[in-house]
Image: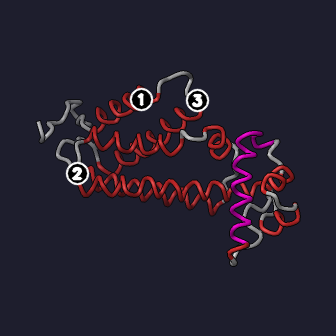
Amino acid sequence: MPARTSPRKVPRQERSRLTVEAILDAAARVFERHGYAAGTTNRIAERAGVSIGSLYQYFPNKDAILVALVQRHLEEGVAVAGPVLAGLTAERPPVDVAMRRLVEAMVALHRERPALHRVLFEEAPRPPALRRRLDALEDAAVAAVSAYLRERDDVGRDPELAARMVARVVETVTHELVLRPRGVAVDAYVDEAVVLLTAYLTTNRDTGVPSVTPEA
């Protein structure tokens, strides 16, 4: 039977919510410093200043804590990406400007604590509920980018498919830059990602010829 990855108890009172937040904050620091294998519940409880019994009142194991951290990170991502995506359809900026906004927003979200993000994205379990949440967030982002692309006469690709490609490329670029920078300057990496995405979107799929930019 797979290990349980959902919280054992939902905090309802303010004191309980503060305890859960203390556990999650402590877990983030423990995983960041020690990694997944050495990030034990005992270390997390000690860092949070709670007893191990109190920790287990809310979380059955460290995987459940890790999943909760991923969920919290996703909410932070929505707060960052939401206004950017809304701005694309409201303002209809040039493609290169739009792609830069997307890439820079995701880089800013992930680059602050790379060691923690490595654990969250490479070692955290992916129970069905979390996978559904990840899929729903990607679908929402794709829908927003697709709506923006439909309004651009200089985009030479199928909007929905292109939006899906943009979402995957931005995600991959962001994670690789943050988790495996290999000495590449962040600004240079972002610039190259913007060039890649802009060239892809503004080149006609059938002819290979760059589309005409209305603003030119």
Snapshot quadrant of residue 103 = top left
Left or right: residue 156 compared with residue 176 = left
Crowding at dot 2, Cα within 10 Å, few <14 / some 14-19 / many 20+, comes out as: some
Membership of 211 in magenta stretch: no
Q: Which mark is residue 92?
A: 2
Tag 2: amino acid: Arg
Tag 1: amino acid: Asp
Left or right: residue 35 compared with residue 215 = right
**Distance Cα–Cα, label 3 vs label 1:** 15 Å
Tag 3: amino acid: Arg
Q: Residue at x 74, y 59 (%)?
A: 23
Query: Which residues are drawn in magenta?
Result: 16-37
Residue 137 appears at what percent x and percent y? 48, 58
Residue 132 appears at what percent x and percent y? 57, 61
Left or right: residue 27 compared with residue 160 = right
Q: Nearer the viewer, mark 3 or mark 1?
A: 1
Going from N to C along the chain, the mark reached first, 2 or 3, is 2
Q: Nearer the viewer, mark 2 or mark 1?
A: 1
**Distance Cα–Cα, label 2 vs label 3:** 33 Å
Q: Secondary structure at mark 3?
A: loop
Going from N to C along the chain, the mark reached first, 2 or 1, is 2
Taken as a whole, is the magenta stretch helix, strand or loop? Answer: helix
**Distance Cα–Cα, label 2 vs label 1:** 24 Å
Q: Residue at x 24, y 30 (%)?
A: 208
Q: Residue at x 71, y 46 (%)?
A: 29
Q: Which mark is residue 180?
A: 3
Q: Which mark is residue 187?
A: 1
Q: Nearer the viewer, residue 43 or 154?
A: 43
Q: Secondary structure at mark 1?
A: helix
Q: Secondary structure at mark 2?
A: loop
